Amino acid sequence: MSIILKTEKLRVEYRSREIRQGTKVALHGLDLEVGTGEVFGFLGPNGAGKTTTMNVLLGFVPPTSGSAYLFGIDVRQPIARQRIGYLPELTYYYKFLNAEELLRFYAKIFGLPRAVADRRIAELLKLVELESAARRPIKSYSKGMQQRVGLAQALINDPDLLVLDEPTSGLDPLGRMKVREIIQRLKNEGKTVFFSSHELGEVESVCDRVAIIHQGQLKAIGRVAEITGTHANLEKAFLEIVGYQKEPAS
Amino acid sequence: MRNTIAVAGIVIKELYRRKDFYVLFIVTILICLVMASINIYNDANVVRYIKEVCLDLIWVCTLVVAVTTTARQIPAERENRTLLPLLAKPLTRVELILGKFLGCWLACGLALLCFYLFFGALAASREHHWFLTNYLQAGVMQWFMLGMVVALSLLGSLVFAAPSSNATICFVIIGGILFVGRHLDQEALQLAEPLRGLVLCLYFVLPHLEFYDLRDLVVQNWPPVAWEYIGLALLYAVFYQFIFLIGACLVFRRKAVN
């Protein structure tokens, strides 16, 4: 299994706009490795540094120190993003376009030939069940439909690595199940999926390995069974790893 | 280049799907048609006043389209978070800036073409003659001037986060250059050093947008300007577009987009 995603001593500091607050360290020397074909869950409480890690991997934020690689290429080079798909946590797309136009635009950015793009767009609209709404402006879509368009755009280039930032956030149970099915399908196709989520039950069911990050530091990494260990489930293990203690009953 | 063209295509699509341009175009048509329907004092040359007002409106409307369309491009992408999925693709920030510039400039060109077609029809209906070379020169010069305005607004949109503040500042700068810029050298001569040197520097550094104002040529039906002068003015415009775009790329290069 070759390494597809790698970070080495990744450190990110944000300078606060308030003079007295100085800098905030979002990541403290994060080391991560994700191999080909893995479904990797990236877990942590809010503000732990999950989105920051993804932002560095996607080139949105430059690391303060350390490095990150996708397919062995430094993430600062745009070519590193040729074989990845990305779904942000909150999906917003050009409201004046419809789903088909949006997918065609992204297909152009990936340089897909017209015939390939046409076929791919038709496949994806079918996959995310938006065929009937393909020509409707995105501004008329519900949140679940927008999330599905987001998933379709993330898959337009048939990526080898899919980066999903809380893909099921705000979705109804049906939408969540659909996303889970798609992740499972990608796993069966041998794709690598790197995703963050707060839905630990979902993570337990689809992930091969997970990493738990807290206050910018990697707290645990391994197979789901290894992390769960003697605990009843992943949620219990997660709470213990991040140091949550139940308040004693008075 | 492929990515730049793809981004430019989206900008043009946005322009023709929004109402801004149509509102300005219809208002211009209505004002000009109302003016053209009356003949004050039975003046045979009244057509020149109509042409002048129409060209003034075209100048104002295309400047509004150029500044407002460009000023919202990057801030709106950031605010709506459409920038994230876009930059997660193999698209460089330079390509994005160039795409935005090209899209806004072409969109302004299309808007200008519509306005000039209407102007040509209006002028021909009264003069029974088309001064095509004059219209072409005026249109091309104005388009390249709008290119400088678009590049300046794009740079401003990366410095000022809110589209409204950027648009206001751009309008003030452009208005200042158009109305005051051309007189700065004369004003400098009346000042003492070191202020004189500073004002003279400003005169030479600022892009002289007034060079591109050929309204009198069109209104008075003067003979066309020699093409070599037009060529030099276009090179001057390209130089300033290049400078503003380099500035925009440098500002955007290290900007965190999260």
Image: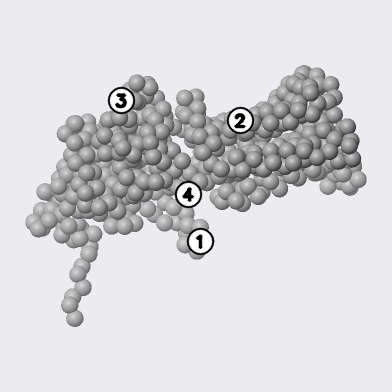
Residue at 85%, 24% in the rendered image = B222
Q: Nearer the viewer, mark 2 or mark 4?
A: 2
Q: Residues within 10 Å of mark 2 (few under 14, many from 20)?
A: some
Residue B57 vs A122, above or below: the answer is below
Same chain? Circles 3 and 2: no
In this view, the residue in front, B247 or B174, is: B174
Read off the residue under disc 1: A18
Q: Residues within 10 Å of mark 4 (few under 14, many from 20)?
A: few
Q: Quadrant of the C terminus of chain A?
A: bottom left
Q: Amino acid at mark 2?
A: Leu
Image side of residue A225 versus residue B102, left or right: left
Q: Give the spatial CA distance, label 1 vs label 4.
A: 22 Å
Q: Are marks 1 and 4 in contact (CB under 8 Å)?
A: no
Q: Residues within 10 Å of mark 3 (few under 14, many from 20)?
A: few
Q: Are marks 2 and 1 in contact (CB under 8 Å)?
A: no
Q: Amino acid at mark 4?
A: Glu
Q: Position of residue B164 (x, y in %)?
A: 60, 51
Read off the residue under disc 3: A119
What is the number of the mark on residue B110?
2
Q: Nearer the viewer, mark 3 or mark 1?
A: 3
Read off the residue under disc 4: B79
Residue at 31%, 37% in the rendered image = A132
Same chain? Circles 2 and 4: yes
Q: Amino acid at mark 3?
A: Arg
